[in-house]
Amino acid sequence: MNRPAPAALPSRSARKLALVRRVAGAQDALPCVENAPHTAADVRFQRGTCAPFEWCGFHLLTGPVRPRIFRRMNVLHRYPTLADVAHVRQGHAFRGAIPAVPDGPVRVIQLKNLTTPATLSPEHLLRTRLSSRHSPRFVEHDDIVLANRGTRPFAHLLSRPPAQTVCRPHLYIIQVTDPERLLPAFLAWQLNHVDVQRQLRRQSAGSRQHSVRKCAVEQLRLRIPSLYTQQRIISVTQALQSTRETFNALMQARDAEITALAERMLQERAA
């Protein structure tokens, strides 16, 4: 039984010609761009049906097969740096140890004051008297204090700090330059986000004592949504913080109750 001869496959030049014809048909729907590439060598396409085209630099690329380098460059270009939306400065430069003056007019925020919000209260801050000739730059409301030492440099938002308050040199003071675009509370939350903390740990230097340079802080990449989204994130975060504080207070009260009960049982047994 004679079998029919298999159909001859199209040659490589024929396949190229067919693809160029398909590309030429898709180019009719594209906007007219000056100096656009029109040769087959300048056009990239995926296998099968032709994907929608998109301009990227000086090359006409299809959306699904855009090179990975273009995607990363677009993402980094879309995310602003911290220097674009805020001003970063270092704390007051003290010479040597800070002398403690009980009735001093100036209060100092130290690294140990950033452990909990309660330690930032005026009664927990060190009081001193400055002897420098130049007038210091005091912190203001909605300033963000970022620790530049340690394994986890946390950021803290200052809410109505006492008058004439400065920070130590190993603390950065961050002031938002465009409040209509970025809320200070949201910036403080994002600086404590896992992605930004990963950037800070990657840029930290030092073997024993990790420190973050000012230029590294200014080059942090941020994601800035709309003000409505920022406010929603702040509200959810504040609710979580309130729940955490309530839970910790209940746990402390329960711990004190169990300790008192155990002590009573020991006294009854001894009697």
Image: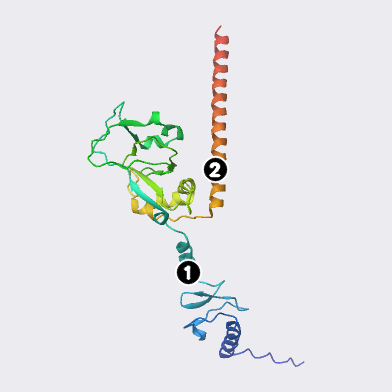
Pointer 1: residues within 10 angstroms few (<14), some, or many (20+)? few
The residue identified by callout 1 is: 70
The colour style of the image is rainbow
Q: Is residue 84 visible?
A: yes
| Closest to the observer, 87 or 190 | 87
Q: Amino acid at mark 1?
A: Phe
What secondary structure is found at the residue carrying circle 2? helix
Q: Amino acid at mark 2?
A: Thr
Pointer 2: residues within 10 angstroms few (<14), some, or many (20+)? some
Residue 49: % across, % down: 63, 78
The quadrant the C terminus occupies is: top right
Residue 62: % across, % down: 55, 75
The residue identified by callout 2 is: 237
| Image quadrant in which you'd find residue 136 | top left
Q: Residue at the location (41% across, 57% down)?
A: 84
As drawn, the residue found furthest toward the right would be 1
Q: Earlier in the sequence, mark 2 or mark 1?
A: 1
